[in-house]
């Protein structure tokens, strides 16, 4: 059972928590350039990348799909429907992109796969989410998207430390 918890339950719970928290926090701007969600959402890529490195791309896709389903359902109640739907579309496509890029780069230096996959998937996620969630609302969504992407890139660099720590002593099984 502990193997199933590590392989399945913990990543799905982490993914769901991160996405729901991010969908709530994105509604609270810090300034005209940034919302609080910019600091929590990059952890979703960490969860995906850790799952991919440890258990392979098939399990990482499953975690993303289940996390997506749970997060969208919960976000409809905890965030606005428009944000929940924009988040769902951006999240699922960005996570699947992250898995594909990570898997292609998995045999490179330890930092390349998580950094490059997170950077490219974050760019896609940011563009899709902010345009779907906030276009034509009168809110400064373009500047939020720019600030959000800058924060995601900063977080992608910072999250290399826990990635290295958590994966450094554990062999990949995939």
Image: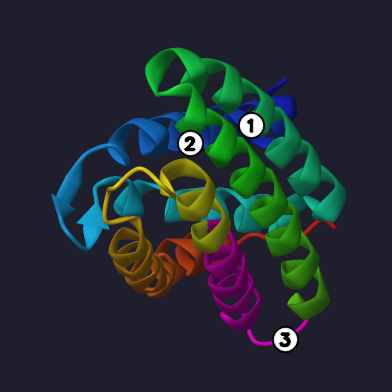
Stretch of the chain drawn in magenta: 107-125
From the image, give the main secondary structure of the stretch colored magenta: helix
Answer with mark 3 or mark 1, whichever residue precedes in sequence.
1
Q: Quadrant of the N terminus?
A: top right
Q: Residue at x 44, y 50 (%)?
A: 135
Note whether residue 171 is visible: no
Q: Are marks 2 and 3 in contact (CB under 8 Å)?
A: no
> Which numbered marker is on residue 67?
1
Answer with mark 2 or mark 3, whichever residue precedes in sequence.
2
Q: Residue at x 63, y 51 (%)?
A: 48
User: Residue beneath label 3, please?
Assistant: 108
Task: Give the SS element for disc 2.
Answer: helix
As drawn, the residue found furthest toward the left would be: 31
Q: CA distance from mark 2 to mark 3?
A: 29 Å
Answer with mark 2 or mark 1, whichever residue precedes in sequence.
2
Residue 128 coordinates in the image, percent (x, y) = 57, 55
């Amino acid at each position: 059972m502990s193997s199933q918890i590590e392989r399945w339950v913990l990543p799905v719970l982490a993914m769901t928590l991160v996405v729901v928290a991010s969908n709530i926090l994105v509604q609270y701007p810090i300034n005209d350039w940034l919302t609080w969600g910019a600091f929590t959402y990059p952890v979703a890529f960490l969860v995906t990348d850790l799952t991919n490195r440890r258990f392979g791309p098939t399990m990482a896709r499953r975690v993303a799909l289940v996390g997506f389903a749970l997060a969208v359902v919960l976000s409809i109640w905890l965030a606005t429907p428009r944000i929940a739907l924009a988040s769902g579309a951006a999240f699922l496509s960005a996570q699947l992109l992250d898995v594909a890029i990570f898997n292609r780069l998995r045999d490179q230096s330890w930092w390349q796969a998580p950094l490059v996959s997170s950077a490219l998937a974050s760019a896609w996620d940011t563009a899709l989410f902010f345009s779907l969630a906030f276009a034509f609302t009168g809110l400064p969504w373009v500047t939020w998207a720019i600030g959000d992407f800058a924060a995601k890139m900063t977080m992608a660099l910072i999250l290399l430390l826990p990635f290295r720590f958590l994966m450094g002593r554990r062999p990949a099984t995939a």
